[in-house]
């Protein structure tokens, strides 16, 4: 399995606070059957310069690599970022924030209000050669109330991600996500693991398999990023 959304890097955001916590999350990922882990710390373009973020990410990754040593050579790590939506995104060089070696960019939209400029901004990113993946869309009430907003963004060329926890929490959350998957509005499942949120991608996939079939579950946790290689 591939986990395209994690906060495992130590001390860079609200994810793992220490190298020890990072190592524990990596072990939990491996135990759940994940073989490729994308490292996607938060990037807020209006709070931090791109250069500062990339420097902090590199230093955090070096700490993790040093702690892992050669004992985890069977696990592939991809550097990336969870990029907070901003109308200024098209003005930035976003290539270093894409999943390493690809043109795929994980984008987090605002929590409370759907920005009217979002479709235009996301389309401009695509014109620049990037393909947005919208993070945990099931958490946004505006999408839950108006799933046609997701449909429009998918039709324009975006992908969508849902988080494992939403399938493992209360019945209402599970129903929302399963309905989105059933209607073709979710392209990949990811853990969005933090120090306080364990990666349970295998358990989430099992829920999907039971309700919607093995093929759909397998596709959701094995999103093929190779077709977006640079």
Image: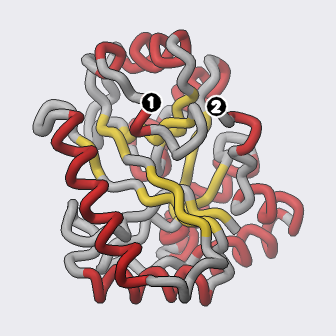
Q: Which residue matches tag 1?
A: 95
* Figure coloring: secondary structure
Q: Secondary structure at mark 2?
A: loop
Residue at image position (39%, 45%) is: 140
Residue 63 appears left or right of 197: left
Q: Are marks 1 and 2 in contact (CB under 8 Å)?
A: yes
Query: Around disc 1, counting alpha carbons within 10 Å, would you say few (fewer than 14), some (14 to 19), or many (20 or more)?
Result: some
Number of the label disc, if any, that sits on residue 230: 2
Residue 219 at x, y percent in the picture:
79, 56
Query: Is residue 148 at least partly visible in the picture?
Result: no
Residue at image position (29%, 88%) is: 20
Q: Where is 206 relative to 99, above or below?
A: below
> Mark 2 or mark 1, which is nearer the start of the sequence?
1
Residue at image position (36%, 83%) is: 67
Residue 72 appears left or right of 18: right
Residue 13 appears left or right of 105: left
Residue 165 at x, y percent in the picture:
49, 71
Front residue of 123 and 139:
123
Q: Where is 52 relative to 61, above or below?
A: above
Front residue of 75 and 203:
75
Residue 209 occupies quadrant? bottom right
Number of the label disc, if any, that sits on residue 14: none
Query: Around disc 2, counting alpha carbons within 10 Å, would you say few (fewer than 14), some (14 to 19), or many (20 or more)?
Result: few
């Amino acid at each position: 399995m591939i986990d395209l959304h994690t906060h495992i890097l130590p001390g860079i955001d609200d994810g793992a606070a220490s190298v020890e916590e990072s190592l524990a999350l990596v072990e939990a990922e491996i135990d759940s059957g994940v073989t490729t882990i994308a490292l996607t710390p938060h990037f807020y373009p209006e709070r931090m310069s791109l250069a500062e973020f990339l420097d902090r990410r590199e230093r955090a990754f070096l700490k993790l690599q040093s702690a892992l040593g050669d004992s985890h050579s069977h696990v592939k790590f991809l550097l990336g970022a969870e990029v907070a939506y901003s109308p200024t995104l098209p003005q930035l060089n976003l290539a270093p924030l894409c999943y390493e070696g690809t043109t795929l960019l994980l984008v987090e939209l605002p929590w409370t209000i759907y920005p009217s400029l979002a479709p235009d901004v996301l389309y401009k990113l695509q014109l620049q050669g990037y393909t947005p993946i919208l993070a945990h869309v099931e958490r946004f009430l505006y999408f839950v109330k108006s799933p046609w907003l997701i449909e429009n963004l998918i039709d324009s060329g975006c992908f969508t991600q849902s988080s494992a926890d939403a399938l493992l929490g209360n019945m209402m959350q599970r129903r929302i996500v399963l309905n989105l998957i059933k209607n073709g509005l979710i392209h990949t499942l990811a853990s969005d693991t933090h120090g306080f949120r364990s990666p349970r991608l295998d358990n989430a996939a099992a829920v999907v398999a039971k309700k919607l079939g093995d093929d759909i579950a397998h596709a959701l946790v094995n999103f093929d990023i190779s077709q977006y290689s640079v």
